[in-house]
Image (tube, grey):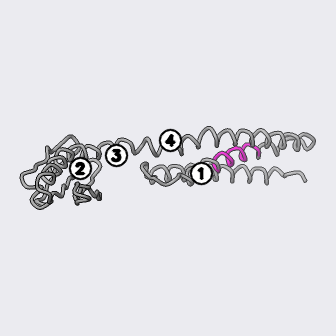
Amino acid sequence: MPVSDSKLKLLIANARWVVLALATIWVAFLCLMDPCSERPAYGLVALAASTAVVLLWKNHIRLLAAPPRRRALRIAAGFAIDAMALVFLVAAGTFPFVMVMSTVDCYTPRTRVSEAFILADSAQAQIAEHVKQSGTLAGSGKGVTLAVPGKWVDGGYVSENGTVVITTSDPPAFIVLTPHLANGLVAWDCAGF
């Protein structure tokens, strides 16, 4: 069944609106996306795949204006090529992005927070030494200080019972290291906020 010129123009006009809507969704998605999310980026993969499909579909609408004898062959060949291109685009474009980007984006903030644990190491060693000599946690934090502030660490505090509290600024974090005795040795519980 041949497509009339008015229907063809309407299809092309609607395709332009779909492409514009997809561009708007991409901008909104990228602005609202949390770069350090630990969750898989299924929404991003679906958006990338649907964008590729819509753009390829938009190009096929133009093929409807071809003469009737060649139209079916052109459309079939176009869809076969587009299917191969789509598989390549999804595999080559989105898979590495989903697998690598969330880890790389979050590496620097995690490294900055690790400075707090490095600064707490000397306090933990002093508390463990006190427990080794006295056999109790009571008073193990008395006189123990932290070498703060560091580059990313804002401050810290050691309580009399040996609890170590450290705060960081970028990213904002609050780390609490609480000692307890396990078979006469000091073990640490870590909580972070």
The residue lying at 24 percent from left, 47 percent from top is: 116
Find the magenta span and give its range.
Answer: 50-60
| Circle on res. 168 | 2
Q: CA distance from mark 3 to mark 2?
A: 11 Å
Is residue 133 shown left or right of residue 77? left
Which dot, 1 or 3, sits closer to the camera? 3
Along the line of sight, the residue nearer the viewer: 142 or 183 = 183
Residue 90 located within the stretch drawn in magenta: no
C-alpha gap between disc 3 and disc 4: 16 Å
How far apart are the two marked residues, 2 and 4, measured between alpha carbons? Answer: 26 Å
Judging by the rendered image, the residue that carries numbered circle 4 is: 100
Which mark sits nearer the N-terminus, 1 or 3? 1
Query: What amino acid does circle 1 point to?
Result: Leu
> Contact (CB < 8 A) between labels 3 and 4?
no
Q: Which residue is mark 1?
A: 47
Residue hosting label 3: 110
Circle 2: residue type: Thr
CA gap, disc 4 and disc 1: 18 Å
Disc 3 is placed on an element classified as helix
Q: Residues within 10 Å of mark 1 (few under 14, many from 20)?
A: some
Magenta segment, prevailing SS (helix, strand or loop):
helix
What secondary structure is found at the residue carrying circle 2? Answer: strand
Residue 24 image offset from top left, x and y in percent: 54, 52
Left or right: 12 in relation to 99:
right
Label 2: how many Cα within 10 Å (few below 14, some 14–19, many 20+): many
Measuring from the top left, give residue 62's x and y in whole percent: 77, 43
Q: State left or right for residue 42 relative to residue 146.
A: right
Q: Residue at x 54, y 50 (%)?
A: 26
Nearest to the observer: residue 174 or residue 145: 145
